[in-house]
Amino acid sequence: MRYTGGMIYWNADLAEKIACTRQEMDTLPSHIDHLIELAKTIDQSGIQPSADQFSSEKDSFLRYGLRLLGEGFAGEILEEILAVLLYVSSARGLEFLRQCIDAEALLSIANDEDQDTLTRKLLPYCGIDTALTSYEKRNQNHAN
């Protein structure tokens, strides 16, 4: 993985780090649901610069990213910090893929993107079939 001025380049090294089984990928929609709920909470009540607001968050990558948001980091600086964290991460497989999804979600939250945009950005990480199924389910639930 290489970060150059606002873009993470996907390469063989990154592809190897995110490789996981189909069963593992099937767990991603629930993780994405959690991130979307988190974004809703932040949109409704804001984010505080204290570490306590999200101290119950189990994932240290996500917790650290939320802390950065609370401290006001956004844009290219936030993207650069998250890219460095991903680059030095020792995580592999599903754990690393979740970190990539978390980074995408954190950047979307920092950019004040709406829930539909966030959903469209995160679901492709599940693979096309799961993304389509999940998106159709979300649209049906939203219509009801």
Image (spheres, rainbow, N blue to C red):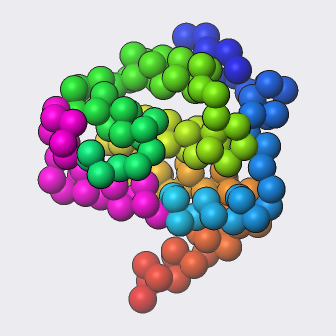
Q: At 43% from the left edge and 78% from the top edge, which residue is drawn?
A: 142
Q: Is residue 62 left or right of residue 30?
A: left
Q: Is residue 114 depicted above or below 60 in this figure?
A: below
Is residue 110 shown to the viewer in this render? no
- Look at the image and tell me whether residue 46 can be seen: yes
Which part of the image, by quadrant, shows the C terminus?
bottom left
Magenta-tinted stretch: 33-53
Give the residue at x 52% y 74%: 138
- The residue drawn where x is 61% and y is 75% is 136
Of 137 and 38, the residue lying toward us: 38
Q: Position of residue 46 (x, y in %)?
A: 17, 46
Our reading of the magenta stretch's main secondary structure is helix
Judge whether residue 42 is colored magenta.
yes
Residue 8: percent from left, percent from top: 63, 23
> Can residue 39 be found in the magenta stretch?
yes
Residue 1: percent from left, percent from top: 70, 20
Q: Is residue 12 above or below residue 104?
A: above
Q: Nearer the viewer, residue 132 or 14?
A: 14
Point 31% across, 28% down: residue: 68
Nearer the observer, 114 or 43: 43
